[in-house]
Image (cartoon, helix red, strand yellow):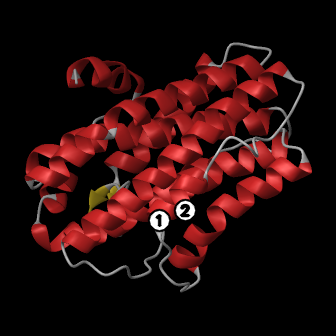
Amino acid sequence: MDYPQILSPVLNFLHCTTPQAWLDKARDPANLPLLLTDHLVCELKAAQTAMLLVRKYVADKQGADALLAWLQPYEAFAFRDGPEPDFVALHKQIGKSVMPQTDDPWGQALIGSMVLLIKEELHHFWQVREAMAARQIPYVKITASRYAKGMLKEVRTHEPLTLIDKLICGAYIEARSCERFAALAPYLDEPLQKFYLSLLRSEARHYQDYLALAQQVSKTDITPRVRFFGEVEAALISTPDAEFRFHSGVPV
């Protein structure tokens, strides 16, 4: 895989790279359990975000309910002390038979991108869970970082501007994940390093999908808005942050 080629547009898109202080803390083996736990939850939240976009903006009721059902076992395990499901069996059930339907071309593009994203994020979820199990790391609930909340706070409150802003936020979250996987990989053990580098291609595609959808739904050029969120995102990454998480800022 050509990592520099995948990373180059991501690094051009982001307004800053991960601070060295975050990497120094992340490479400490004592922080690996926390990092993997937060990574696990981030994969599920990415799937939830995509599902909510489809449910809110395009899905018919049957398709929307089917998407909800895909995520429920993962949510029960991660957020509600539910039993650990058989993730491999679950993943095999995620088929195209219950794809949400719409006649709207933009809606169809959203469904296509987001359903693929949901499948990939849920697949990554159980891959992270396997990595944790291999290292005897139990799953323990943790609090969320300020990162996504900090960006969503800036989302405009009337449509279609809300949708455009949410899609741009989605693009930055995916791009930052991609950048962090690459930055962190050299400090990880070989199986984990291989896994993190394998995630780059999908995360890089996800951010581009989000941006394309945002531009398609907007009647004006989204560049100024993309720049605005780039500055918000960079501030969250490069300023002191009391909590250490996968998307946190400079450790205090």
Assess disc 1: are there few (<14), some (14-19) or many (≥20) residues with their C-alpha within 10 Å of its C-alpha: some
* Whole-percent x, y for residue 135 in the image: 18, 72
> From what the image shows, is residue 113 above or below residue 18?
above
- Image coords of residue 167 (percent x, y): 64, 35
Image vertical order of residue 184 relative to residue 103, above or below:
below
Direction from residue 117 to residue 154 in the image, left or right: right
Residue 86 seen in the current view:
yes
Q: Nearer the viewer, residue 150 or 198?
A: 198
Residue 162 image position (x, y, % from top left): 77, 39
Q: Viewed as shown, does residue 196 lie left or right of 207?
A: left
Q: What residue type is labelled 2?
A: Leu
In the picture, residue 1 is in which quadrant?
top left
- x 41%, y 52%: residue: 124
Give the residue at mark 1: 87
Image quadrant holding the C terminus, namely bottom left
Q: Label 1 is placed on what type of residue?
A: Phe
Is disc 1 in contact with disc 2, using a CB cutoff of under 8 Å? yes
Q: Which residue was labeled with disc 2?
A: 90
Q: Which residue is drawn at 43% across and 58% down?
A: 125
Q: How crowded is the residue under tag 2: few (<14 C-alpha within 10 Å), some, or many (20+)? A: some
Q: Is residue 101 above or below residue 248?
A: above
The answer to whether any part of residue 19 appears in the image is no
